[in-house]
C-alpha cells in the first residue's frame, strides 16, 4: 500500500483525526487509501505546542490508514479557509503548494520498527490490529 512518512507530532495528529489536511510542495493525482508512517524526525516546537493533547507520539511505525480524498492547490483564500477550520492545528500560516484532504482515518497498531522514506513508498501491512 502507498505510504507517506510524517514527522511527529504531525503523524499522531493525522492518526487521531485532528489534522485533516497534509501540506506538501507537490501535487498528487492519487486518490485512495495510504498508510501514515511516523518517522524518526520530530518537530520539537510543534510537539511542545500539542503536548496538552495527551497523544502518543511513537516513531518508526505505521500509525493509521487514511484516504486521500482530494489534492487542492493552495491559494491565499483556500489557505485561510483551512486555517479557520481549526486554528489550533493549522495556525495562521501563509502556505503554498498543495493540501491533501484526508478522511476515513483508521488507526493501526504496528509493533514493527520501520524506516521511513521521502515521497510515497510501498509497504505491506501484515495483520493490522
Image: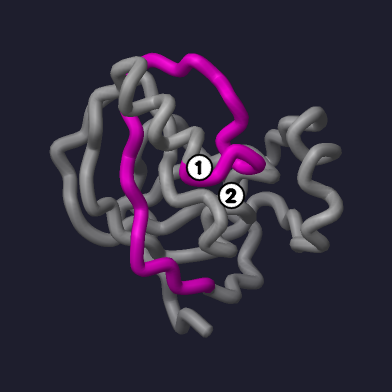
Colour option used: one colour
Which corner quadrant of the image does residue 125 belong to? bottom left
Q: Nearer the viewer, residue 30 or 123?
A: 30
Residue 51 as seen in the image, left or right of residue 24:
right
Residue 102 as seen in the image, left or right of residue 11:
left
Give, as a single range, the part of the protein colored magenta.
85-107
Circles 2 and 1: CB atoms closer than 8 Å:
yes
Which corner quadrant of the image does residue 75 belong to? top left
Which mark identifies residue 11?
2
Coordinates of residue 69 in the picture (x, y in percent): 23, 53
Above or below for 116 versus 80: below
Coordinates of residue 93 in the picture (x, y in percent): 55, 20
- Residue under numbered circle 1: 5
| Residue furthest left in the image | 29
User: Which residue does the image show at 70% across and 51% down from the upper left?
Assistant: 59
Magenta highlight on residue 43: no
Which corner quadrant of the image does residue 47 belong to? top right
Disc 2 on helix, strand or loop?
A: helix
Front position among marks 2 and 1: 2
Amino acid at each position: 500500500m502507498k505510504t507517506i512518512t510524517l514527522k511527529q507530532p504531525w503523524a499522531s495528529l493525522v492518526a487521531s483525526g485532528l489534522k485533516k489536511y497534509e501540506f506538501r510542495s507537490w501535487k498528487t493525482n492519487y486518490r485512495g487509501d495510504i498508510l501514515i508512517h511516523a518517522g524518526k524526525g520530530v518537530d520539537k516546537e510543534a510537539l511542545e505546542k500539542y503536548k496538552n493533547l495527551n497523544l502518543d507520539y511513537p516513531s518508526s511505525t505505521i500509525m493509521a490508514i487514511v484516504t486521500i480524498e482530494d489534492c487542492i492547490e493552495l491559494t491565499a483564500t483556500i489557505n485561510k479557509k483551512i486555517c479557520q477550520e481549526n486554528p489550533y492545528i493549522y495556525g495562521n500560516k501563509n502556505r503554498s503548494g498543495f493540501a491533501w484532504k484526508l478522511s476515513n482515518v483508521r488507526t493501526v497498531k504496528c509493533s514493527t520498527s520501520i524506516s521511513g522514506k521521502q515521497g510515497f513508498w510501498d509497504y505491506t501491512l501484515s495483520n493490522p490490529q
